[in-house]
Image: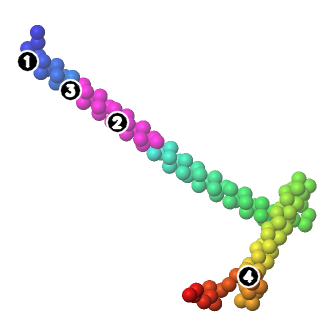
Amino acid sequence: MLTFDELKDKVLATAGTVADKSIEMAKFAGDKAKLAAKIARLNAELAGERETLRRTYQEMGKRYYELHRTAPEENMAQAVADAEHSLEKIEAKRQQISDLKTELKFSGEDYEDYMDDDIEDPDDLEPEA
């Protein structure tokens, strides 16, 4: 059987070992957290660079179209035709929207034309006796 002093020494040794392992684990976790933070920062920077590249490509395409839309290179002819078709559709839809907005802005006289003659105006009704 262990004496109290022997038991105390074992408990203190075990506690010291646990403390040392806890410190190691905390350092390990801290190092991993730092690495994860670096990865997250780099992923954010990567996303920013991809967005910059996307905008650059978009601007290049727009400039190419503006410069060569009347005489595109053979390998770009279909892309230019697709862009022209999209622009025509956009313009047609803008015109439709404009026409519908104009239709919405009808005058008061037009409003009367839309009203059903069978509907009585509540202000003209006399109370029943």
| Secondary-structure class at tag 3 | helix
Give the residue at mark 2. Answer: 27
Badge 4: residue crowd in 10 Å (few <14, some 14–19, many ≥20): few
- Frontmost of labels 2 and 3 is 3
**Residue that extends furthest to the left in the rendered view of this protein:** 4
Task: List x then y, in percent, for residue 92.
Answer: 83, 70
Q: Assess whether mark 3 and mark 2 are in contact (beta carbons under 8 angstroms).
A: no
Q: Position of residue 23 (x, y in %)?
A: 29, 33
Whether residue 107 is visible: no
Question: Which badge, 1 or 2, is on the more N-terminal residue?
Answer: 1
Q: Earlier in the sequence, mark 2 or mark 4?
A: 2
Residue type at the position of mark 4: Asp
Dominant secondary structure (helix, strand or loop) of the stretch shown in magenta = helix
Picture layout, residue 89 above or below residue 41? below
Residue range (magenta)? 15-36
Residue at x-position 48% and y-position 45%: 38
Q: Which residue is mark 4?
A: 118
> Residue 104 versus residue 28: which sits nearer the camera?
104
Q: Residue at x 63, y 90 (%)?
A: 124
Q: CA distance from mark 4 to mark 1?
A: 105 Å
User: For the residues marked 2 and 3, what is the alpha-carbon distance in whole angstroms?
Assistant: 18 Å
- Residue 19 located left or right of residue 122: left
Q: Quadrant of residue 8?
A: top left
Q: Earlier in the sequence, mark 4 or mark 3?
A: 3
Question: Residue 23 lies in magenta, yes or no?
Answer: yes
Circles 4 and 1: CB atoms closer than 8 Å: no
Which mark's residue is nearer the viewer, 4 or 1?
Answer: 4
Residue occupied by mark 1: 4
Q: Position of residue 61 (x, y in %)?
A: 77, 60
Q: Quadrant of residue 62?
A: bottom right
Q: Quick one: SS at disc 4? A: loop
Answer with mark 2 or mark 3, whichever residue precedes in sequence. Answer: 3
